[in-house]
Image (tube, rainbow, N blue to C red):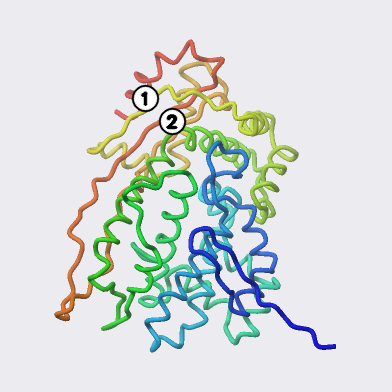
Amino acid sequence: MRYLRWRMIYHDWLYGKWELPDFIEKIVHTKPMIRLRAISQASGPACFLPINIPSRFQHCLGACFLAFEALKYNRNFSDYGILLPLSALLHDAGNPPFSHLSEPFLKEITGKDGESFLENILDGSDTEKIIRDLGIASEAVVRFVTGEMFPFSNILHGSLDLDNLDNISRFNKSTGMASEHDYDAPRIASAFRFMNGKWALLGSVFSEAKKWQKARKLAYKTIYTFPHLDAAIMLYRAVELAFLEEELKYDFFLQDDYGAIAYLLKRCNKRTRKLVDRFLRWQWYDEVFCAEIFEPSQKIKDIAASGWEGRKKLADYLCRKLGLSQEQTCAYIGKGRDARKIEVPFFGKDGTFTYDKYEPNIIYRIKVYISPETQIVRRKVAQLVSEFIS
């Protein structure tokens, strides 16, 4: 009897049906990719956020699809015909649980970020074996993902790149933020051309690229506001407190979102557990202070640049002054990622390159959240924040 082998058809709600190439199908079934099915594209487990969020798995397959779209029109790019889509597929596989939320603590403990930690995830995995069988070293995939294969890797690690094209479109449409700024991601991906030692985009997609720029601002409008940031900053504080108690071990960063939640609840301190429990119950803390600053002082810039330590200092300062415990106060201070200049040049019919003239107006945000039972102190927060940043 002769058995037929059906190739896998992936139904992407964003791009439609896609018949996966054999080597992509094999990797989709490996443990690092299975893990990504349970890691959110946002900052926490999707089912515990009150908005619809795709998974990193969906996003990585989307970026991989766009990589094949780009390769259709760059046939002289044959040396990267497997490496590019392979890297696109695995570009988020090194993400720790809760993605960028726990990434600062990953870096403190391992010295690596979510991109370079891919090396650890691949080491000895079933994914690595498949990559090796393809004649590619896993180190090459890691270098492509981290942008070290400049200039070729810029198509995945640049300003407007395959990662960002899928990321923004998928996030906006899944969260219901689709608008007049919708853009055609496959069309932009297919307009990439590698010429004169650098990536460029055909001038015909300039208007689509500008839509992406506006759509990005729309996406981050959701990320930096209720309900996303309210929930995310509570979970962030929970992870931070666990880190300070030296409870985050290496195996925490190998978990998916749900495994990490269980880890925090079973293996960490009482304050962390209390915050996680409230997060799971959708008992968000109240936003009692919000400032959006376009011309920040040097001190605000320095605090924002210090990352998790700056947020901790602000939150702990408020705790001391207000007489609250650490788990009752959460603070966010950071440089906005809303606006991004398109660094990829556009190639005109006359053979000349032009560049996007847009200069982003960077927003610095300061937000403070306190538990509902402490509302009596909210009137003091604005003055205390002013003292902290002055």
Type of residue at label 2?
A: Leu
Location of residue 94 in the rendering, given as x and y in whole percent from the top left corner: 57, 61
The number of discs equals: 2
* Picture quarter with the N terminus: bottom right
* Disc 1: CA contacts within 10 A as few (<14), some (14-19) or many (>=20): some
Q: Looking at the picture, tell me which residue is in the foreground, 380 or 184.
A: 184
- Mark sitting earlier along the chain (1/2): 2
Residue 30 on image: x %, y %: 69, 69
Disc 2: CA contacts within 10 A as few (<14), some (14-19) or many (>=20): many
- SS at badge 2: helix
Give the left or right position of residue 358, taking residue 173 as reference: left
- Mark 1 sits on what residue? 385
Instruction: Say if 188 sits above or below 255 in the image.
Output: below
Identified at 65% across, 85% down, the residue is 133
Q: Is residue 339 above or below residue 111?
A: above
Q: Nearer the viewer, residue 118 or 302?
A: 118
Residue behind mark 2: 314
Task: Provide the secondary structure element on which disc 1 rests.
Answer: helix
Going by the numbered disc 1, the residue's amino acid type is: Val
Percent x, y of residue 71: 42, 80
Please determine whether, in this image, residue 195 is positioned above or below residue 234.
below
From the viewer's perspective, is 111 left or right of 291? right
Point 58% across, 27% down: residue: 327
Identify the residue at image location x=47%, y=29%: 315
At x 48% / y 66%, what residue is drawn? 63
Classify residue 284 by image quadrant: top right
